[in-house]
């Protein structure tokens, strides 16, 4: 039977077509809800129970790691572990301060002026007093080191006093033109 140019078969097939067009294709996805995105690149967020379980597991793993590095643990509960860890870290910080202080004292001990060796030679009318000490402990050590860096030999050295000042005079041999450069180096070394 044909009604208005359409057969019953045509109506069914057009109904089927409209049904097929309205059904979602397997490739098409429904739009996702707005809101917080799942962590760690997961497609679907974990439910709250699973997320809490993972959080506790992660926290417990960190407590196990802490328990492994703290040497003296009084009790096995978490609060005691944290207290013992704080005590251990405080002790380590105290040891670091003590070691740094000892290191500084040792360093200062080497740089302090040591008691010089004194040699006294008596003559007929005059005497010679000779004092020696390590180069690093002597106040003129920076001058001597600068001389050595420039391969300059001090031919003679004289120490005298004048108006509450100590004057140390060096006689050196310089090659032509090097005196001005040496003066700049000495001023730089002594100003440090």
Image (tube, rainbow, N blue to C red):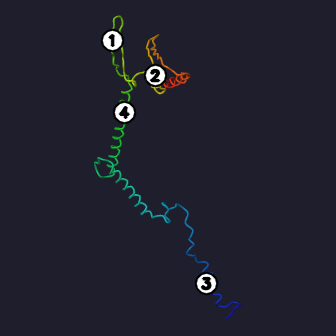
**What quarter of the picture does the N terminus occupy?**
bottom right
In primary-sequence order, the first of circles 1 and 3 is 3
**Residue at the spot x=33%, y=8% of the render?**
123
Cα gap from disc 1 to disc 2, whole angstroms:
26 Å
On the image, the x and y values in percent for residue 149 come to 47, 27
- Is the residue under label 3 in contact with that under label 1 (CB below 8 Å)? no
Q: Which residue is mark 2?
A: 153
Tag 4, which secondary structure? helix
Cα gap from disc 1 to disc 4, whole angstroms:
40 Å
Tell which of 44 and 97 is nearer to you: 97
Q: Which residue is mark 4?
A: 103
Q: Quadrant of residue 168?
A: top left
**Residue at the spot x=62%, y=78% of the render?**
21
In primary-sequence order, the first of circles 2 and 3 is 3
Q: Which residue is mark 3?
A: 16
In primary-sequence order, the first of circles 4 and 3 is 3
Q: Which residue is mark 1?
A: 121
Between disc 1 and disc 2, the foreground one is 2
Cα gap from disc 1 to disc 3, whole angstroms:
128 Å
Between disc 4 and disc 2, the foreground one is 2
- As drawn, the label of residue 37 is none
Specify few, some or many for label 1: CA neighbours under 10 Å numbering under 14, 14-19, or 20 or more: few
Specify few, some or many for label 2: CA neighbours under 10 Å numbering under 14, 14-19, or 20 or more: some
In primary-sequence order, the first of circles 4 and 2 is 4
On the image, the x and y values in percent for residue 103 come to 36, 33
In primary-sequence order, the first of circles 1 and 4 is 4
Cα gap from disc 4 to disc 3, whole angstroms:
91 Å
In the current view of this chain or complex, which residue is farthest to the right?
A: 4
In the current view of this chain or complex, which residue is farthest to the bottom?
A: 1
Cα gap from disc 2 to disc 3, whole angstroms:
110 Å
Specify few, some or many for label 3: CA neighbours under 10 Å numbering under 14, 14-19, or 20 or more: few
């Amino acid at each position: 039977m044909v009604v208005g140019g359409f057969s019953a078969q045509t109506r069914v097939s057009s109904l089927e077509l409209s049904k097929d067009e309205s059904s979602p294709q397997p490739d098409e996805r429904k739009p996702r809800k707005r809101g917080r995105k799942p962590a760690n690149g997961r497609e679907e967020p974990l439910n709250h129970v699973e997320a809490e379980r993972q959080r506790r597991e992660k926290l417990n793993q960190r407590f196990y790691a802490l328990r492994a590095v703290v040497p003296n643990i009084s009790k096995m509960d978490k609060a005691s572990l944290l207290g013992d860890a704080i005590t251990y870290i405080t002790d380590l910080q105290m040891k670091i301060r003590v070691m740094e202080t000892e290191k500084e004292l040792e360093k200062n001990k080497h740089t302090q002026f040591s008691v010089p060796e004194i040699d006294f030679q008596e003559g007929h009318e005059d005497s010679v007093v000779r004092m020696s000490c390590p180069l690093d402990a002597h106040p003129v050590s920076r001058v001597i080191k600068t001389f050595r860096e420039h391969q300059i030999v001090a031919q003679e050295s004289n120490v005298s006093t004048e108006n509450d000042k100590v004057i140390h005079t060096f006689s050196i041999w310089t090659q032509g033109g090097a005196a001005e450069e040496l003066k700049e180096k000495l001023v730089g070394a002594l100003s440090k």
